[in-house]
Amino acid sequence: MLTIRLSRIGKKKKPFYRVVVIERTRPRNGRVRELVGTYDPLKKPAEIKLDAERIKYWLGVGAQPSDTVRSFIRLQKIA
């Protein structure tokens, strides 16, 4: 089963996240299917960039978003 979730990159105390499509059983920073966006919580306000077309595609194929990514999708009014 595929999921759309956050993958952390960046240094200690300076988080930066990628929004990725990945198999549910893979580790947090494991091999991903596709990168569909980014999230930078350190900017004020937090910066969220999502590729709406690709997210719609993956949701249509059956990928399930995590709770955090679901809230990002609602904020961006994608689905």
Image: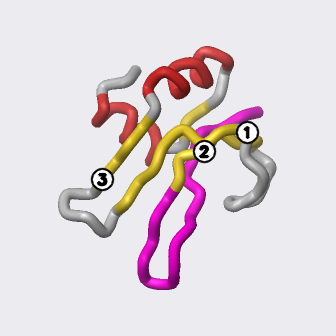
Q: Residue furthest top?
A: 60
Q: For mark 3, what is the residue?
A: 47
Instruction: Tell me whether the residue at label 3 lies in contact with that at label 2, contact meaning CB atoms closer than 8 angstroms.
Output: no
Label 2: state its secondary structure.
strand
Image height of 3 relative to 45, above or below: above
Kindly identify the amino acid type of the residue bearing the numbered disc 2. Val
Label 3: state its secondary structure.
strand
The dot on residue 52 is none
Between 61 and 51, the one nearer to me in the picture: 51
Question: Residue 63 location, x and y as percent?
Answer: 65, 28
CA distance for labels 3 and 2: 16 Å
Q: Is residue 16 magenta?
A: yes
| Badge 2 or badge 1: first in the primary sequence | 2
Q: Is residue 68 magenta?
A: no
Kindly identify the amino acid type of the residue bearing the numbered disc 1. Arg
Q: For mark 1, what is the residue?
A: 33
Residue at screen point 66% across, 38% down = 34
Kindly identify the amino acid type of the residue bearing the numbered disc 3. Glu
Image height of 23 relative to 41, above or below: above
Residue at screen point 73% across, 46% down = 32
Give the position of the N terminus as an image quadrant.
Answer: top right
Instruction: Tell me whether the residue at label 2 lies in contact with that at label 1, contact meaning CB atoms closer than 8 angstroms.
Output: yes
| Residues in magenta, as a range | 1-17
Label 1: state its secondary structure.
loop
Image height of 10 relative to 74, above or below: below
CA distance for labels 2 and 1: 7 Å
Q: Is residue 62 left or right of residue 67?
A: right
Question: Residue 15 location, x and y as percent?
Answer: 45, 71
Give the overall secondary structure of the magenta segment: strand
Give the position of the C terminus as an image quadrant.
Answer: top left
